[in-house]
Image (spheres, rainbow, N blue to C red):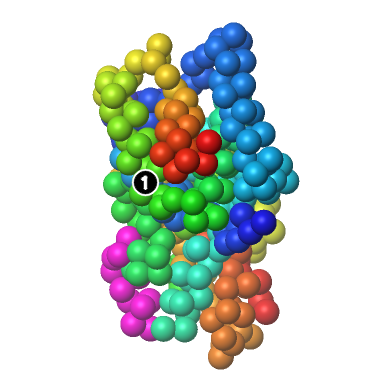
């Protein structure tokens, strides 16, 4: 098992800019629930082990976020939160890669 | 917070919790299903996921900034680029991700010692300095460092010569400051890798000095 390979923060993840940038407060990642952390870590672990390119995950994440119609200027708290989009993206990608 | 203090470039809309208990259990189930599957296939382990979370929550340490400082100490041309355009010079080393803010690097000299604060909230150059220490966000630091910087630095154990002027730099959404500390005399000639180890987070905020050797 080599999913600890490169156990360093990866810039392409921590530095994502735009609608899909990670929720942060003064640099701290913002997680509300344990499941959010686990979903976060799984997507990164799979990428680190070479199951997909980060851009593939990110493209899905961006389209999930875009399809909610939510933007910073037009927040919609009733819509899925960031890690719900993240989770849906992970599920889609796992299907696409036939891991599930 | 004052409304003309533009600290949050359009705020990330996802900072508040959104889901109630029932919705949360559904989400938890979806996540644990995936996790169970990936574990059964030997693709991840519980421990590796825990470790991954820990890395992203805690280990985004000040090493990035330390490398910037060590490079500036050993490479004069890099140093002048750094002082001229911090954002680009830092990006040269592969550190970016600032969300529209500019990095300004201010150099400590014999005459001037610099300290960084964000008086109105807690703007912090996290891509280079990692997670902010808790005191950085506390009201006492934010107000007192401006009013009585020398006393505050002494409380941090940093005693500066009386003739050295202390300048306090107030970060904002547009500008994030980082201090380029003075290289310890004893460390002249040391390798860049060795120097990285001398650069502390506090020395890049300006409340401390680098380790002497």
Q: Position of residue A99 (x, y in %)?
A: 52, 41
Side of A49 relative to B158 (left or right): left
Q: Is B22 contained in the magenta span? A: no
Where B204 sits versus B108, above or below? Answer: above
Chain part drawn in magenta: B76-88
For the N terminus of chain B, the quadrant is top left
Residue B127 shows in this picture = no
Q: Is B80 contained in the magenta span? A: yes
Where A11 sits versus B108, above or below? Answer: above
Q: In this view of the protein, which residue sits in the foreground, B156 or B125? A: B125
Number of marks in picture: 1
Q: Position of residue A5 (x, y in %)?
A: 60, 61
The residue at the point 40 percent across, 11 percent down is A78
Q: In this view of the protein, which residue sits in the foreground, B166 or B211? A: B211
Where B203 sits versus B126, above or below? Answer: below
Q: Quadrant of residue A88?
A: top left
Q: Position of residue B114 (x, y in %)?
A: 47, 60
Q: Secondary structure at mark 1?
A: helix
Q: Main secondary structure of the magenta part?
A: helix
For the C terminus of chain B, the quadrant is bottom right
The residue at the point 63 percent across, 36 percent down is B37
Name the residue furthest bottom.
Answer: B189
Residue B67 shows in this picture = yes
Q: In this view of the protein, which residue sits in the foreground, A71 or B11? A: A71
Q: Position of residue A92 (x, y in %)?
A: 42, 33
Name the residue carrying label 1. Answer: A56
Q: Mark 1 Cα within 10 Å, few/some/many (few <14, many 20+)?
A: few
Q: In this view of the protein, which residue sits in the foreground, A81 or B76? A: A81
Side of B51 relative to B95 (left or right): right
Host chain of mark 1: A
């Amino acid at each position: 098992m080599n999913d600890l390979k490169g156990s360093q923060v990866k810039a392409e993840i921590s530095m994502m800019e735009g609608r899909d940038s990670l929720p942060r407060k003064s640099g701290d990642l913002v997680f509300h629930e344990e499941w959010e952390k686990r979903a976060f870590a799984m997507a990164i672990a799979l990428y680190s082990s070479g199951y997909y390119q980060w851009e593939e995950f990110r493209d899905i994440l961006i389209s999930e976020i875009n399809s909610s119609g939510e933007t910073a200027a037009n927040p919609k708290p009733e819509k899925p939160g960031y890690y719900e989009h993240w989770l849906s993206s992970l599920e889609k990608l796992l299907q696409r890669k036939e891991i599930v | 917070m004052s409304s003309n203090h533009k600290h949050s470039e359009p705020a990330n809309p996802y900072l508040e919790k959104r889901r109630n208990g029932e919705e949360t259990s559904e989400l938890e189930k979806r996540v644990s299903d995936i996790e169970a599957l990936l574990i059964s296939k030997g693709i991840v382990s519980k421990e590796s996921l825990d470790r991954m979370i820990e890395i992203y929550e805690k280990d985004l340490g000040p090493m990035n900034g330390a490398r910037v400082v060590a490079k500036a100490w050993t490479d004069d041309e890099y140093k002048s680029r750094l002082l001229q355009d911090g954002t680009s010079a830092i990006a040269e080393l592969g550190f970016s991700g600032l969300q529209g803010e500019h990095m300004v690097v201010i150099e400590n000299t014999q005459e001037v010692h610099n300290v960084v604060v964000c008086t109105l909230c807690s703007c912090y150059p996290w891509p280079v300095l990692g997670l902010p220490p808790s005191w950085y966000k506390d009201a006492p630091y934010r107000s007192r460092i401006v009013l009585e910087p020398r006393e505050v630095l002494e409380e941090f154990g940093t005693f500066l010569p009386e003739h050295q002027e202390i300048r306090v730099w107030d970060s904002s959404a547009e500008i994030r400051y980082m201090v380029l500390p003075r290289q310890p005399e004893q460390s002249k000639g040391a390798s860049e890798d060795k120097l990285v180890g001398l650069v502390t987070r506090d020395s890049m905020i300006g409340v401390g000095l680098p380790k002497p050797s």
